[in-house]
Amino acid sequence: MRIPEKGGGGLIQEIRVGTRQGQSIVQAMTSSSFPRGRSAPSLIFRALALCALAAAFLPRAFADTLTWTGAGDGSSFNQAANWSPAKVPASDDDCAIGPGAPAVQVLGNPSVRSLTLARALNITNCWQLTVGVELAL
């Protein structure tokens, strides 16, 4: 991005934000405004670091708490219609299966963030269920 400036223009290399005498200051440093001998910081590195920092402190935006209803076929873990809200559990979801019959059947290799289980769960044919954070029985 090029910005006009007195005496020429340059590529934006750094943006500084701060206060001076109670006033907010935003300063765009361009390739032509850096002091001699000082290299411009990598914008890509700074952007990636900022995104990583933001992601670490933001709540899980797309995770759901899924509750077993059995409204589909009544037994398939991997069937969206058996869950509320109706979706197949994903690795960032918290899942709760209350008491009752029949046993819940796991087919495939699903992953969930946490699982609270109050009924039988069958995992057959060398399939596996991965629970990332917490399993409560």
Image: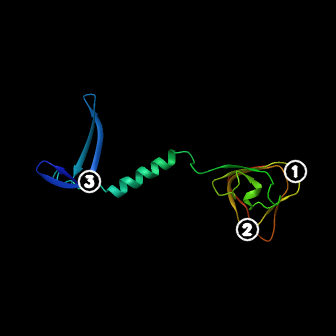
In the rendered image, which quarter is residue 88 located in?
bottom right
Residue carrying label 2 = 108
Q: Quadrant of residue 104?
A: bottom right
Name the residue type under label 1: Gly
Whichever of callouts 3 and 2 sits on the residue coming sooner in the sequence is 3
Q: In the rendering, which numbered label is found on residue 13?
A: 3
The x and y percentages for residue 17 are 30, 40
**Residue 83: percent from left, percent from top:** 74, 53
Distance between the Cα atoms at labels 3 and 1? 62 Å
Query: What crowding class fits label 3: few (fewer than 14 Cα within 10 Å), some (14-19), or many (20 or more)?
Result: some
Q: Would you say the residues marked 3 and 2 are in contact, meaning their CB atoms lie under 8 Å apart?
A: no
Residue that carries the numbered disc 1 in the rendered image: 100
Residue 58 locus on image (x, y percent): 52, 45
Please give the name of the residue rendered at 25% of the width and 55% of the height, measured from the top-left corner: 40
Residue 31 showing in the rendered view = no
Q: CA distance from mark 3 to mark 2?
A: 49 Å
Three-letter amino acid code of the residue under disc 3: Gln
